Amino acid sequence: MNQKAVRKTADAVKKRWSETVSCLDRIPMKRMAVYAGILFVLSLIPILMLGRYNVMCVDDYDYGRQVHDTWLATGSVWRSVQTAWRQNMEFYRDWQGTYVSCFLMALCPMNFRYDIAYVVPILMVGMFAASTYVLGRQVLGRWLGAERAGGSFVMFMVLFMFYQVMEAPFEGIYWYNGATHYVLMQSLWFFALAAVSAGLWAQKKSKEVICCLTASVLAVIVGGGNLVTGLQAEIVMGMLVLYAVVVKRKKLPAVVIPFVTGSVGFLFNILAPGNLQRSSQDMDTGYPALQAVVLSFYHAVVFIIQWTPAFVILVWLLLLPVLWKLVKKSERSFRHPVWVTLGAFCVLAAMFTPTLFALGMVGLSRVDNIIQMVYYLCLIMVTAYWLGYFAHRGDASEAQPGVDAAHKMQEQPDRMDGGQSSMTIEIRTSGQQRAGETLGMFLEKAAGRMTIACVIITIVMWIFTADKNTYTSISALRSLAVGEAQTFYAEAMERHEIYTNEDIVDVEIRPYSARPALFDFSDLTEDAGNWLNLAVMQYYHKAYVKVVSD
């Protein structure tokens, strides 16, 4: 009886599983995209809710001090903006050339109202997620020929994955200064790149002109941001100009104009007098240019391994059947997978070069956030391209003149060299075709099972992870649930009351008793001469500021 019951239960489970898989296979791609979008939005809710307890910190004080003083003295937004620009020009002359980033960092929202720091995660997540989605959809749709709904599904899953394993959530979501300099500038570059792509594929001249103008303005702004994004923009735009020269010569102005404006902005950045003056004062020494480039490729491999944990592998496996279906229906040729892979890897590696050249190091968390997202985009797009290559091998071999020539050469047995060459081509082509057919059969046959299994494992791993700080949303939810965020914010507001009390000149504050794990910034110390302490002291015009323990 027990064996019969076990067998009956197993059969029932197997039947239920088959029905579930069959049902999943019949779900329209539009509905799958909606489900993926809902999952992504739900994952953002705890992250944005934690932003309610965000506060001003670190470099926000140094860059915002003059604007804050102007605002308190005049109450004028326009005067504050003028002060920000004046300070920006001083920085350009004496400290650094990032003329757009420095201007925006001076206009920190908390300079005008301290308790408005919750807008920072809304701005940074909104800009970065939207720009990544737009660019990803543009590449999948225009360049790889994927349908719109399928592209949406893929990008929602990529965004969900990224925000859960983000290298430094605080520096990319909650910290205004750090996120503005890197995440916001990378967002504008993604929008600019999407505009260039749209111009290349535009059917109407009016749309091409609008895309070109938009990209040109954004390119100048990106050129005045961080050097990691700026160098990336120069390399990618150079590649697109070469592509337009070879393939779409009529569209050349739509690429060349943004390339020129962005290059001019980038030159103004790197040739700033402040860069030379800062380098003479900075004790950090970087590598020579050639050595920095070589080391960039090494570090790219190291960080690729680091940024590919089990969670990322599961999402990648989940997307394989979907990507196969999308590229199989595509009308693109997918003829150069090796070159596409090398190009993507070179772009990724180049993002490590500026810090190696300037500082002789990698691993700056606020920089790693944007490199990590570029890696995930490259991973998905290169995977899709290789799948498209295998899916269309049969069509490609029929269209290749070399294959037809090989068949003709086979009809001439007296030309032994030609016969051997044609046989090699034929064997290679048939081998690639068989490999593509085998991969396609596996992905199509295992699509439902593979997808649902990966979804279940991913959700279980995400929700029931042993360390609740492993994934960003779960960490934020835990901090809200246990009250860390609320306690931290109450104590931060107590500090602010002391800072703004004109009767208190010598400021002594207690250390935080609780703080969310995602808010991993450096706090003030017991040393009044520490640079963080000095920044707060100067911002609020105190004699000194220091932490004292009970």
Image (spheres, grey):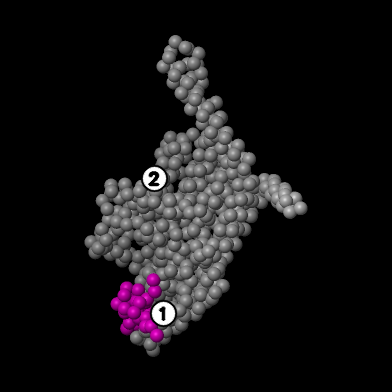
Residue found at the far left of this picture: 280
What is the crowding at mark 1: few (fewer than 14 residues within 10 Å), some, or many (at least 20)?
some
Q: Is residue 537 above or below residue 281?
A: below
Residue found at the far bottom of this picture: 503
Q: In the rendered view of the protein, which quadrant contains the C terminus?
A: bottom left
Q: Is residue 15 rendered magenta in the image?
A: no
Q: Position of residue 39 (x, y in %)?
A: 60, 58
| Residue range of the region highlighted in magenta in the rendering | 522-550
Q: Which residue in the structure is indicated by mark 1? A: 511
Residues 168 and 252: in front is 168
Q: Is residue 59 visible?
A: yes
Q: Which residue in the structure is indicated by mark 2? A: 346
Q: Quadrant of residue 481?
A: bottom right
- Residue in view at x 30 percent, y 50 percent: 292
Helix, strand or loop status at disc 2? helix
Q: Position of residue 516 (x, y in %)?
A: 48, 71
Residues 487 and 4: in front is 4
Residues 20 and 123: in front is 20
- Residue in view at x 37 percent, y 58 percent: 363
Precedes in sequence: disc 2 or disc 1? 2
